[in-house]
Image (cartoon, rainbow, N blue to C red):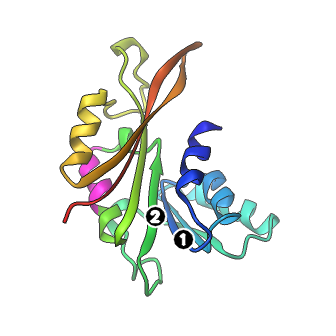
Amino acid sequence: MKRLDTIMSFATPQDMCLDIGCGDGVYAFALSQKCRKVVGVDADYDGIRLANLRLAENKATNCTCLQLPISKISTSSLGLDEKFDMVYSMDVIEHLPDPEELIKSSIRVLKPQGLVIIGTPIFENAELVSPYHVKEFTLEEITSLMARFLDIKEVILLPFDRKGTVYEEGYYVGVGVPLA
C-alpha cells in the first residue's frame, strides 16, 4: 500500500499524529504501531465505529478515533493539551465543498514545524471522475491550493488505478509545513 508507506516514511516514534478522514481506521492503526499517539477523526459514524472496533481488537491503546466534522477540529475538541507533529489526510480533500477548510484545520492543530500531508487522486479526464468527488484537482491546482497555506517540502506522485488502467503518476501526495 504505497500511500500508507508514504505517510509512514515521515512518521517518527515521538510523533503525535492526526488522521483527518480516518474512515475505518486502517491508516490510524498502522501509524499507531510506529508513533507515540494517533487520533483519527471522521464525520461518518459507521467508519468511526469500525475503526474503534479494529483498535479494540488489536489492543491499540495509543490510538483513538472520534466522530467529528472537519470544521470542529481543535485540540480542545479532541481533548488534548498539545498540538500534533503530523497531520495527514488521504482521499478526503476531493470530497469537500470547501477544500481550504481541510488545510486550515490541519494547520490549526499543528506544531509550528509540524508536517501536513495531503493525498488525492489527480484529475485525468472527466470520464474518470468519481461521482462521489466534489472536485478532482489537476497537479497544478492541488499544488497551488496547498502552496497558499504551506511551504511545500515534497511532492510525491504515486501510481493510481482508475477503472482498470494504472496511471503511474495518478495520485498526489503533498508534504508541507505552515507558512511563517
State the image coordinates of residue 56 (x, y, percent, origin top left): 76, 69
Q: Earlier in the sequence, mark 1 or mark 2?
A: 1
Residue at image location 43% in from the left, 16% down from the top: 128
Residue positioned 71% across, 64% down in the render: 33
What's the mark number on residue 89? none
Which of the labelled discs sits on residue 86, or is there none? Answer: 2
Residue 103 magenta-drawn? yes
Q: Bounds of the magenta span?
A: 97-104
* Quadrant assignment, res 120: top left
- Name the outermost residue toward the front: 153
Main SS type for the magenta part?
A: helix
Give the residue type at disc 2: Met
Q: Is residue 4 above or below residue 139?
A: below
The percent position of residue 31, horizontal first and vertical second, equals 63, 60
User: 96 or 5, which is in the foreground?
Assistant: 5
Residue bearing mark 1 = 15
